[in-house]
Amino acid sequence: MPTYDYHCHTCRKDFTAMHKISEPAPNCPACGGEVSKKVSAPAVHGGSAGHQSSPTAPAAAHGCGAGACGCRH
């Protein structure tokens, strides 16, 4: 379940809540006031080997099509 960062308009406290994306924003746990969602960077976990750079991966800036020209990377 995703986590969201909120800011309370009444007491001005920040808090994090975990809920489904389809659920409405919760009220402030400190005072019960209305809140707004804060903009934050998404969490990125894991990844596939095809999308990560590694010392054995072909150089992306080489421009020859990852070895199709016959050169050795």
Image (cartoon, rainbow, N blue to C red):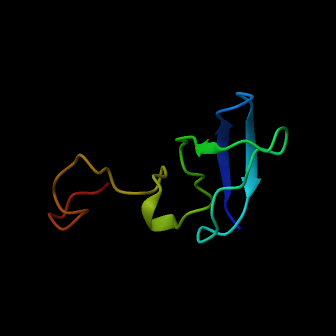
Percent coordinates x, y for residue 38 in the rendering: 57, 40
Percent coordinates x, y for residue 72 in the rendering: 28, 57
Q: Quadrant of residue 26?
A: bottom right
Q: Residue furthest right?
A: 30
Q: Residue at x 21, y 48 (%)?
A: 62
Percent coordinates x, y for residue 63 in the rendering: 17, 52
> The N terminus lies in which quarter of the figure?
bottom right
Q: Residue at x 45, y 52 (%)?
A: 53
Q: Nearer the viewer, residue 44 or 19?
A: 19
> The C terminus lies in which quarter of the figure?
bottom left
**Is residue 12 placed above or below 49 in the rendered structure?**
above
The mark tally for this picture is 0
Q: Residue at x 58, y 55 (%)?
A: 44
Percent coordinates x, y for residue 64 in the rendering: 16, 57
Q: Nearer the viewer, residue 16 or 51?
A: 16
Left or right, residue 56 beside residue 71: right
**Is residue 11 placed above or below 44 in the rendered structure?**
above
Q: Nearer the viewer, residue 72 or 62?
A: 62
Q: Quadrant of residue 71?
A: bottom left
Left or right, residue 66 beside residue 5: left
